[in-house]
Image: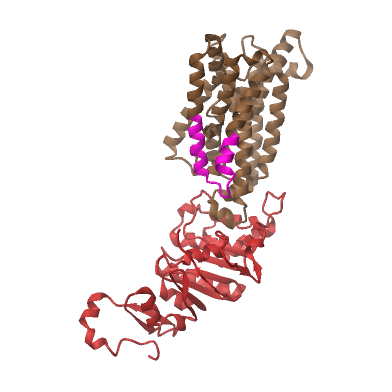
Chain colours: A brown, B red
Amino acid sequence: MKYARWASWLVFLILLLGAVMVWSLSVGASGISAARVVRILCQGGSPVEHSIIFDIRLPRIILGFAVGGCLSLAGVILQGLFRNPLVEPYTLGISGGAALGVAVNIVLGLSAVGAYTLPVCGLLGAGGVILFLYVSSLRTGVVKLQGLLLNGVMISFISSSLVMLLMSIASSDSLHGIVFWMMGSLGGSDLSLVHFMVLVSLASLAAGYFFCLQLNALALGEEEARHLGVPIEQVKKILFVFCAVLTGFCVSIAGMIGFVGLVVPHVMRKLVGSDHRILLGASFLAGALFLIGSDTLARTIIAPLELPVGVITGIVGGSVFLYALAHRGGLSHA
Amino acid sequence: MGIRLSISLHVKSGEFFGLIGPNGSGKTTLLRALSREIAPMNGAVLIDGKNVGDIPVRDFARQVTVVSQVLPEVDLTVEEFVLLGRLPYFNAMQFVESKHDMAVAVRCMALTDSLRFKDKPLDHLSGGERQLAAIARALAQEPRLLLLDEPTAHLDITHQVAVMDLLRKLVRELNLTVVMVLHDLNLASEYCDRMALLRAGEIFAAGTPQEVVDYRVIEEVYKTIVVVNRNPVSGKPYVLIVPDDELCKSRGAWGKAGRLSDGA
């Protein structure tokens, strides 16, 4: 009975994802009807249409799928780990490190060397933060999760202050670049990076499933999980690093897109329940379609101008969160 | 926590063993050492001669299980909660409970009389019902040793007796070994085969309830005047407290009559 419900949720989400993708492909400055979109995907069309669909819109959508899925996955796992519904990938301070890396890159003008340097610098910044957190909180025998959280929040503050420092001494071009990157965008990414992120996202989902039962046990509390035979110190370390690296990749490629990792897991938890066997997959799919949908709105709502996708996810995500809080009488226990 | 234990204890298989003692005497610390939450600085905890520190985590979970005092707050039904107890038996690629797992869970709920509320969410249960559900989950792990930390602390006498009767039945029928921390001396005396009385991290007295629940022993450790009588139904010793004004009132008449631990 339970498994039938889970299966129907997954089917529903996959269909919804497909629908959102087709909608996103059909919407834009030069509108192409949905029926035409499907025909172009299957049989091909005029060179102009082909270019619009395959070179401009599809990469964004695929990147949205990957980043939305990864951020939600990281969000679910972190909320399960910390048993705190307010935790999201960005709380860990990793996005702060990535932002710092990118800011340094822009101010020093390193992108002259190649477009690749931007995500690489972001990844280096994120990696630096992960290393610091690992050495300070994870390396010792017992992982104190609350300490980790506090360290992460402090690093966030310090990084954003440093980024503001760089912004204050930067030229106006650099300033614009930094701010724009920080607001997050799914567009303008190299195709190979997009493919890379898709592989990362699918691999992460598979990897995450190895821990779904242990996350279920962890929901009872660390002591209870230990009594059930879960090697919790090991699991905490592995999952934290896993989420941190995933966040690092997402932030480096797409900038800071907040709220996806916070709101989607929370909403899905209320809809499908707390069992991670369904929650991981459902959150991944819901995050993917949420981000694709938000990105589509972002690029059409004030066309021909483009809003940063973080604006939509922030407003929609934040509103949904407040609504859920008000109507269900409190945050769900993670 | 700051307590240093110096313990040498032997619990027999199939025994219902009680750990009693004043606050801060180290009962919970000892239980945590038995459940491998803390490791001894000197010496070892052995199960059937094997050091518990050497047993892999999952194997240990199949042999020893703990019923904690504080029950978790999660939005699971009783049945889902009990099924979590089967986790140590899942193999690496298994995601779904097998038929055998379901059968074990049902059997455990039947044993603990929790089958009747198996679809209720945990937070809709009363304290007594949650305790039964927690014991069912512990039993689902099919352990040989069950460790309990004051499971009856917040229960009314109906549920206290229900839980203790259940545990005794499990010891007898399943040949389970139970080690239980108890505050209630009378409950311990009534149900335990043997007990150990701790004081300041050491075993002050160990043995049958008749040996341990002796007025001299209790007064020495708990530093309060008590009278020990015999339960007219079961014959086990039970402890009567003596309030201060009673003591002052009947100081004289008391000298000979009230004190007994040997003979009616």
Q: Which residue is at 41% across, 74% downward?
A: B185
In the drawing, does residue A74 fall left or right of residue B200? right
Q: Is residue A73 visible?
A: no
Tell which of A319 and A245 is nearer to you.
A245
- The image shows a total of numbered marks equal to 0
Q: Position of residue A297 (x, y in %)?
A: 56, 18
Q: Is residue B13 above or below residue A45?
A: below
Q: Quadrant of residue B25?
A: bottom left
Q: Which residue is at 69% across, 40% downward?
A: A207
Residue A141 covered by magenta stretch: yes
Q: Determine the main secondary structure of the stretch shown in magenta.
A: helix
Residue B157 covered by magenta stretch: no
Q: Is residue A176 visible?
A: yes
Q: Is residue A292 above or below residue B41?
A: above
Q: Position of residue A228 (x, y in %)?
A: 60, 56
Q: Quadrant of residue A174?
A: top right
Tell which of A320 and A102 is nearer to you.
A102
Q: Quadrant of residue A248?
A: top right
Q: Position of residue A5 (x, y in %)?
A: 62, 43
Residue with the most extreme right position:
A43
Tell which of B26 and A296 is nearer to you.
B26
Q: Position of residue B194 (x, y in %)?
A: 51, 78
Residue with the most extreme left position:
B249
**Magenta segment boundaries in residue numbering:** A130-156
